[in-house]
Amino acid sequence: MKQFRLAVTGGQGVGKTTFVNRLMSLFNERGVAATRVPSISEVIDKQKHRLGSQAGEGAVLAVCDAHMARALNCYSGRVLVFDRCAADMLAYIELLRVTPDNYNPHFEQLSRVLLRDLDLVCYLSMPAWAIANPAPHEGDEFRGEISDRVRGILNRLDVRHVAIDNNTRAEAEFVGDLVWNDLRDRVKYEN
């Protein structure tokens, strides 16, 4: 049976990791074999690239490579949970403008291919508490621009996504129910 691929995205400091942890706990409680895929920052930090609004062309290319590596890796589990996705990558590329403009159509195509493999993206909006807590390597204005751009990319590329406004256990359960129902439907369809 095909794995369910779920990504959690949004601006810096909105609680993506917290939401991923809530989902992982929920899947564990329900007996669903889920795997948290290593985050892009975990992969990139090992390479000593500056991320966020300070990222240069080398970091952008490293992020692209990391997204491709995650997509090609054979992770175990019924559900794969990704912290960030190619919509984030494309948003940074479009706003940072550190790569030659003629690369942008290629980055958009790569993003389309990578996003096509996701079954659902959870977009975490920028709540007031996140705005009040600055991110270590991004200014508030840039953080808001990234958040808005990610949402726009999900819409522009017609990616199946849900908006999460409060990052609560109830919203994690809502997403868990979407995944659970999809998995159940797949079993019915395959039998």
Image (tube, rainbow, N blue to C red):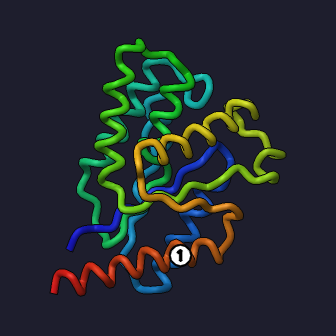
- Return the residue at label 1: 25
| Residue type for callout 1 | Ser
**Residue shown at the point (59%, 59%) measured from the top left:** 163
> Could you say where residue 93 lies in the image, as x and y percent from the top left?
48, 26
- If the image is split into quadrants, where does the N terminus sit? bottom left
Q: Residue at x 65, y 55 (%)?
A: 15
Where's the C terminus, which quadrant? bottom left
| Residue at the (52%, 72%) spot, across then down | 175
How far from the left and from the top, in percent, is residue 183?
A: 33, 78
Q: Position of residue 186 (x, y in %)?
A: 26, 79
Quadrant in the picture for residue 40: top left
Q: Residues within 10 Å of mark 1 (few under 14, many from 20)?
A: some
Q: Quadrant of residue 105?
A: top left
What count of labels does the image hold?
Answer: 1
Please identify the quarter of the rendering in which residue 140 is found.
top right
Could you tell me residue 113's position as x and y percent?
29, 43
Q: Residue furthest right?
A: 132
Q: Is residue 130 above or below residue 167?
A: above
Question: Looking at this view, is 75 or 53 the one in front?
Answer: 53
Dot 1: element: helix
- Relative height, residue 101 to residue 49 (above, below): above
Residue extending farthest left: 191
Residue under the image location 31 percent in, 70 percent down: 77
70 shown above or below 77:
above
Q: Tell whether 124 sits left or right of 43.
A: right
